[in-house]
Image: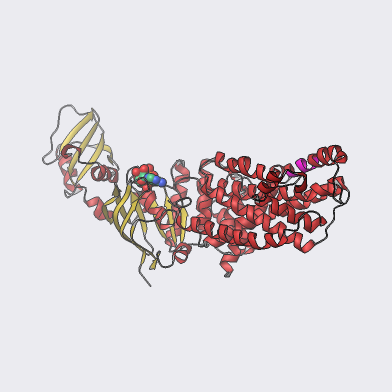
């Protein structure tokens, strides 16, 4: 990256971070509130009555999934809303008329999405620590890698969504009808062996299941170790999605008629 | 080094819906020029401009900016241009200084340089006091100036303004004209579209008129005006006329008792008209050119030949 491109990249990232903090009640607060509610209602009230064969308590069991759920929602929501917003207000033209390359533009927005994921993950981890008491971190490096990968993956999906969206409904559709169901069915609240066999089988087609499983393993060494899977499939998917985004930014009429 | 700020050859644009907005345009703008692009609504002015700044993809043709072919090095070409678009295109929730400084950052200016430059251009455009306000609280005229400041922040050699004075009050418009003239005097090439013909007449050295995606005239201002071969003067008389008058070679139109309009071929010297009036003992207290002459020409060139249609 030459110096001009680097400066342009830093400028986009700074603008995104300023945006996140300017509208913090929409970007940072909601996940803190929902996570607290999940922890209190499911973790403390209901969870204490669930028989769990794991060596961990239920609160510990659901925490990794809750953190990852916050990352998914926020990384996706940041790129989709911010990028679509820039298209809608036409302020995206500020970037398009400048000499920056499409790579710089995409990477700038992705970094914004990942940073929001990381900010929220930090806040939510603090919440789980204060409500749940003990948050373990068995494999910090793996946990961080998975967190960043998942965050980048959903930032990319959000970017594509924002890029192709024609109105605000289009950026709500995917989160409501795909992301939320996949996340809830991704095993945040239950362990696979509690499910009937057909449901277990179905879960293996849910990418979010692997993400949550791996992340949980990295944090508390409970559940399936699917880290190898995550390390092969996610990087592949990330590469694929990145080049799809690049191609669309360069060639499609989504940004330039 | 090319001596043209802009060279456009056979430029065509067909939008996805099949609309042919530019039908093979040729245009050159010398470095340092103040160039006016006129044309009725939908003529293709904004389409042309957005191709120059890469917001729209051309269908066919060549574009060179300061000798740089946009097909070969568009980023380099873009660096040379500052664009003030027709419609507001900034995030109204961002702060004024932020908008301008970010734009500098996109052009590669470091954070410190960007901030300094942004403050400087905001001062130039009298927006410095507003720098910490969100853009949404600015008035329409201020928003225009914000876009001009943003376009100038990386000190481009070529400034393109798409109707910069639309919705700007008279006084501010004059101020902007002076400012643009100053920039031009400093060596910046300026391309301006406008619907105010007096604006083009008083500012521009060269003028192109486009209609339906085609250039119908492209000349320096003087020869363009020479295409108009009649002049109309409006006279306010000192004394009311008692009877119809006639002057040889001049058509006289009596508006009321104390106002007459004289229309005559432009090549007739003004002194001859004055002599004619003297001979008829007509004295007047004021004389002015009736229409904006460019306006007349504009209408002549842009009206379709309906009668032949
Ligand atoms: N994105 C688009 N898709 C399809 N057609 C378009 C698009 N943008 C412009 N046009 C059409 O192209 C033609 C030229 O439009 P353009 O905006 O360039 O005109 P203009 O000369 O700038 O007009 P105005 O003075 O009203 O700003 C018009 O017929 C317009 O409807
Ligand atoms: Mg226009």
Foreground of the two, B123 or B269: B123
Q: How many marks?
A: 0
Q: Is residue A175 visible?
A: yes
Foreground of the two, A83 or B80: A83
Q: Main secondary structure of the magenta part?
A: helix
Q: Residue furthest bottom?
A: B1
Q: Is residue A33 magenta?
A: yes
Which quarter of the image is occupied by the N terminus of chain A? bottom right
The residue at the point 69 percent across, 55 percent down is: A115
In the drawing, does residue B170 fall left or right of residue B261?
right
Q: Is residue A131 above or below residue B181?
A: above
* Relative image position of residue B64 (x, y in whole percent): 37, 64
The segment highlighted magenta reads A31-36
Q: Is residue B273 above or below residue B56?
A: above
Foreground of the two, B53 or A249: A249
The residue at the point 37 percent across, 56 percent down is: B58
Q: Is residue B195 visible?
A: no
* Relative image position of residue B219 (x, y in whole percent): 27, 56
Q: Is residue B210 magenta?
A: no
Quadrant of the displayed image that contains ligand 1:
top left
């Amino acid at each position: 990256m030459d110096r001009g491109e680097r400066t342009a990249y830093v400028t986009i990232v700074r603008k995104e971070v300023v945006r996140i903090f300017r509208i913090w009640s929409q970007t940072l607060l909601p996940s803190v509130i929902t996570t607290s509610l999940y922890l209190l209602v499911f973790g403390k009230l209901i969870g204490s009555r669930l028989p769990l064969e794991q060596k961990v308590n239920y609160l510990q069991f659901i925490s990794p999934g809750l953190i990852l759920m916050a990352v998914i929602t926020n990384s996706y929501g940041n790129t989709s809303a911010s990028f679509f917003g820039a298209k809608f207000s036409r302020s995206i033209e500020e970037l398009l008329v400048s000499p920056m390359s499409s790579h710089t533009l995409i990477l700038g927005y992705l970094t914004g999405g990942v940073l929001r994921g990381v900010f929220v993950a930090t806040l939510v981890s603090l919440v789980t620590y204060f409500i749940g008491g003990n948050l373990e971190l068995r494999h910090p490096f793996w946990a961080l890698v998975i967190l960043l990968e998942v965050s980048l993956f959903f930032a990319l999906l959000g970017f594509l969504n924002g890029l192709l969206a024609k109105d605000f409904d289009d950026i709500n559709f995917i989160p409501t009808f795909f992301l939320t169901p996949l996340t809830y069915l991704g095993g945040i609240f239950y362990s696979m062996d509690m499910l009937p066999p057909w449901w277990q089988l179905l879960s293996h087609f849910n990418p979010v299941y692997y993400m949550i499983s791996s992340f949980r393993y990295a944090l508390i060494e409970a559940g399936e170790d699917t880290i190898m899977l995550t390390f092969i499939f996610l990087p592949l998917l990330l590469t694929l999605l990145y080049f799809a985004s690049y191609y669309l930014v360069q060639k499609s009429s989504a940004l330039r008629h | 080094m090319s001596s043209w700020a802009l060279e456009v050859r056979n430029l065509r644009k067909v939008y996805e819906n099949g609309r042919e907005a530019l039908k093979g345009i040729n245009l050159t703008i010398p470095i340092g020029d103040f160039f006016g692009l006129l044309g009725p609504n939908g003529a293709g002015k904004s389409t042309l401009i957005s191709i120059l700044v890469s917001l729209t993809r051309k269908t066919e043709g060549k574009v060179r900016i300061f000798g740089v072919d946009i097909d070969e090095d568009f980023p380099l070409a873009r660096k040379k241009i500052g664009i003030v678009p027709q419609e507001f295109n900034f995030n109204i929730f961002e702060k004024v200084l932020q908008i301008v400084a970010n734009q500098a950052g996109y052009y590669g200016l470091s954070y410190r340089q960007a901030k300094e430059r942004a403050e400087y251009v905001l001062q130039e455009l009298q927006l410095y006091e507003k720098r910490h306000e969100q853009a949404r609280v600015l008035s329409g005229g201020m928003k225009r100036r914000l876009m001009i400041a943003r376009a100038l922040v990386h000190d481009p050699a070529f400034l393109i303004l798409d109707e910069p004075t639309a919705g700007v009050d008279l006084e501010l418009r004059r101020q902007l004209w002076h400012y643009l003239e100053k920039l031009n005097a400093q060596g910046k090439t300026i391309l301006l579209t406008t619907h105010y013909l007096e604006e083009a007449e008083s500012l521009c050295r060269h003028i192109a008129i486009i209609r339906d995606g085609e250039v119908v005239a492209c000349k320096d201002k003087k020869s363009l005006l020479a295409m108009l071969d009649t002049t109309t003067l409006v006279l306010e008389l000192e004394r009311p006329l008692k009877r119809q008058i006639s002057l040889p070679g001049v058509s006289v139109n009596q508006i009321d008792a104390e106002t007459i309009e004289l229309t005559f071929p432009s090549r007739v010297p003004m002194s001859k008209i004055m002599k004619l009036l003297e001979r008829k003992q007509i004295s007047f207290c004021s004389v002015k050119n009736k229409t904006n002459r460019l306006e007349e020409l504009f209408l002549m060139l842009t009206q379709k030949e309906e009668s032949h249609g």
